[in-house]
Amino acid sequence: MLHFGDDKILLRPTFAALVAAEEELGPLFALVERAASGQLKLSEMVALFWHCRFEAQDKLDRNGFAEAVAEQGIAENTPVLKILLGQILSGQ
């Protein structure tokens, strides 16, 4: 779950979300490997989060969403990324 102030955005790695993320970012295994080696770009993290938004309940467009993620910083978003990647790898 991402928290932008009072707004909460649920991330869920559905099949459709992961297919959309792969179309934009390339193979998910390569994405996971880049994340594990510290080579994941901020833009890639934002794209993965964007595609995994559950039912797109947030009120932000993609640029606003990216700015909100960037404002929170990498340290705040890393635990969310770790959980999401774990769900992708384990099929949850």
Image (cartoon, grey):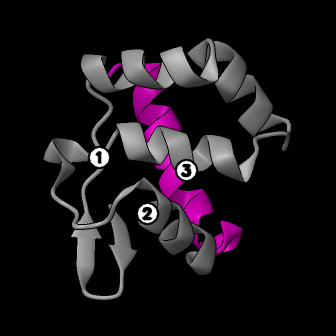
Answer yes or no: do the residues labelled 1 and 3 have beta carbons within 8 Å?
no
Whether residue 30 is visible to the viewer of this picture, yes or no, is: yes
Along the horizontal axis of the image, is 24 left or right of 49? right
Residue 8: x and y in percent read: 25, 71
Q: Position of residue 62 (x, y in %)?
A: 42, 54
Mark 2 touching mark 3, by CB under 8 A?
A: yes
**Place of residue 70 in the rendered image (x, y in percent of width and height, measured from the top left):** 62, 70
Instruction: List the residue tagged with mark 1.
Output: 53
Read off the residue under disc 3. 46
> Which of the 4 image quadrants contains residue 41?
top right
Q: Amino acid at mark 2?
A: Phe
The residue that label 2 is drawn on is 65
Q: CA distance from mark 2 to mark 1?
A: 11 Å
Check disc 2 and report its element: helix, strand or loop: helix
Q: Which quarter shows the C terminus?
A: top left
Q: Residue at x 32, y 26 (%)?
A: 17
Query: Label 1 vs label 3: CA separation?
Result: 11 Å
Viewer-closest of 1 and 52: 52
User: Does residue 74 appear to the left or right of 15 in the view shown?
Assistant: right
**Residue 56 is one of the magenta-drawn residues:** no
Q: Which quadrant holds residue 34?
A: top right
Residue type, numbered disc 3: Val
Q: Nearer the viewer, mark 2 or mark 1?
A: 2
Q: Residues within 10 Å of mark 2 (few under 14, many from 20)?
A: some
Answer whether residue 76 is magenta in the image: yes
Percent x, y of residue 19:
39, 15
Residue lying at 53% horizontally and 61% vertically, measured from the top left? 66
Count the marks: how many?
3
The part of the chain drawn in magenta is 73-92
In the rendered view, would you say 90 is above or below 11?
above
Q: Nearer the viewer, residue 3 or 20?
A: 20
Task: Give me the residue at 63% from left, 15% from top.
Answer: 26
